Image: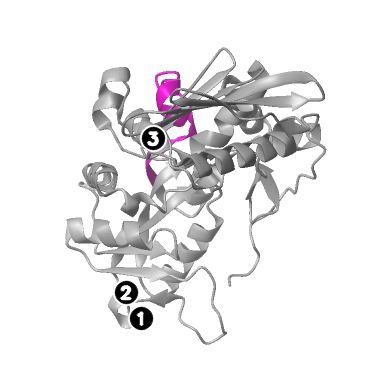
């Protein structure tokens, strides 16, 4: 058994102690395998000086292993067997504990809880939607030490934060709340059809089309051969003089959306509005404005980093929050500080 295979809940960090629970009773053999794998992860990613896991010390319903470097004890790994669950604890130096906390939080069992959000914060709709995205793990963070940094800007630049709302449909109640909120936001717009963009927003566009009872088609991310149609699900004459709402999951730059808008207009359609769930606020609004299109969005990075969203929802550490703010303040300087090449990109001169 590997540590990454274990579903976890109630992950907490306090004073060098990481505590979590798996809602399963682990067998002794499984627990030993888990301890060995946790040590290998600790040695590889957190503290290379660790050289071995101490012998098992069993006492009543608890197992304890010491993390050792020579004769020096670095910390303890505890496994406690309860009636219907197994509790796990990592007792480590504070900096090491924080890293293990960051590793484990991606394995938490996601149970969307809007009541928890309502009880713990009083934000506007954008902040509430952002809190829900944090809660289901749709906003991901990496400092590059435990996992690679994320690739953005046509996969040329790096980022400590990544927004992935493609998994919304995996959480039906969240999907209904988010896209129901989008329906309220867009209810006064005039449009005849909805266009998603391959592939992340096809599901989003389909649900919105169902809610508004409008036709829906999608634009290809790129044409796979010269004579290929840029769209799937609609014929050229069906777009003539039709007003189209373009829908996507996130907005970094508006270049892909501007290309789709241009192709819709070339087919005889019209576009006044574009909707995204998450706006990274990195110039995409201005790019769409230059195309003569108004941007509508449910939430953005300012809302996602709002102090109204407590850490018990975002699971964000102070260091990660600072890193994200430094990145957004000046991406080029952030790359230089990390010894990375920053590519200043321009909009494509030719459409795919």
* Res 350 label: none
Which residue in the structure is indicated by mark 1? 236
Callouts 3 and 2 close, C-beta under 8 Å: no
Q: Quadrant of residue 324?
A: top right
Neighbor class of circle 1 (other Cα within 10 Å; few <14, some 14-19, many 20+) is few
Asked if residue 325 is among those painted magenta in the image, a careful observer would answer no
> Farthest top residue?
15
Callouts 2 and 1 close, C-beta under 8 Å: yes
Which residue in the structure is indicated by mark 2? 239
Question: Between marks 2 and 1, how big is the CA–CA gap?
Answer: 6 Å
Which residue in the structure is indicated by mark 3? 135
Asked if residue 312 is among those painted magenta in the image, a careful observer would answer yes
> Does residue 287 appear in this view?
yes
Q: In the image shown, does 51 or 244 lie closer to the viewer?
A: 51
> Which one is closest to the eye, mark 3 or mark 2?
3
> Farthest bottom residue?
227
Q: How is the image coloured?
A: one colour
Q: Please tell me which of labels 3 and 1 falls first in the chain.
A: 3
Callouts 3 and 1 close, C-beta under 8 Å: no
Residue 212 in picture, x, y percent from top left: 18, 57
Q: In the image shown, does 261 or 183 lie closer to the viewer?
A: 183
Q: In the image shown, does 234 or 258 lie closer to the viewer?
A: 234
Question: Between marks 3 and 2, how big is the CA–CA gap?
Answer: 39 Å
Residue at x-position 70% and y-position 48% = 157
Magenta segment, which residues? 295-316
Residue 186 in picture, x, y percent from top left: 26, 47
Residue at x-position 35% and y-position 50% = 168
Residue at x-position 23% and y-position 55% = 190
Label 2 sits on a secondary structure element that is helix
**Where is the C terminus found, in terms of image quarters?**
bottom right
Q: Please tell me which of labels 3 and 2 falls first in the chain.
A: 3
Question: Between marks 3 and 1, how big is the CA–CA gap?
Answer: 41 Å
């Amino acid at each position: 058994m590997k540590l990454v295979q274990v579903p976890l809940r109630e992950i907490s960090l306090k004073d060098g102690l990481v505590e979590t629970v798996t809602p399963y009773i682990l067998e002794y053999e499984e627990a030993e395998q888990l301890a060995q794998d946790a040590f290998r992860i600790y040695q590889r990613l957190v503290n290379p000086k660790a050289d071995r896991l101490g012998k098992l010390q069993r006492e009543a319903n608890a197992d304890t292993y010491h993390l050792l470097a020579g004769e020096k004890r670095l910390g303890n790994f505890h496994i406690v067997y309860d009636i219907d669950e197994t509790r796990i604890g990592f007792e480590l130096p504070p900096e090491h504990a924080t890293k293990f906390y960051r590793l484990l939080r991606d394995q938490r069992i996601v149970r969307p809880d809007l009541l928890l959000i309502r009880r713990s914060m009083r934000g506007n709709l954008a902040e509430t939607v952002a809190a829900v995205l944090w809660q289901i793990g749709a906003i991901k963070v990496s400092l590059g030490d435990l996992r690679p940094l994320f690739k953005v800007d046509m996969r040329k630049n790096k980022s400590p934060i990544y927004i992935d709302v493609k998994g919304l449909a995996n959480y039906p109640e969240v999907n209904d709340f988010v896209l129901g909120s989008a329906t309220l936001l867009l209810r006064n717009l005039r449009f005849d059809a909805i266009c998603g963009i391959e592939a992340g927003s096809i599901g989003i566009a389909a649900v919105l089309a169902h809610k508004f009872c409008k036709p829906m088609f999608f634009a290809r991310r790129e044409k796979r051969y010269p004579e290929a149609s840029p769209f799937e699900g609609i014929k050229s004459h069906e777009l003539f003089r039709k007003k189209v709402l373009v829908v996507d999951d996130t907005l970094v730059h508006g270049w892909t959306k501007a290309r789709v808008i241009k192709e819709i207009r070339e087919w005889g359609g019209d576009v006044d509005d574009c909707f995204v769930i998450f706006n990274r606020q990195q110039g995409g609004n201005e790019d769409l404005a230059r195309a003569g299109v108004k941007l509508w969005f449910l939430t953005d990075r300012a809302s996602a980093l709002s102090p109204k969203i407590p850490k018990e929802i975002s699971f964000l550490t102070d260091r990660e929050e600072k890193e994200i703010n430094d990145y957004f303040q000046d991406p080029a300087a952030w790359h230089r500080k990390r010894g990375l090449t920053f590519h200043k990109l321009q909009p494509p001169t030719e459409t795919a």
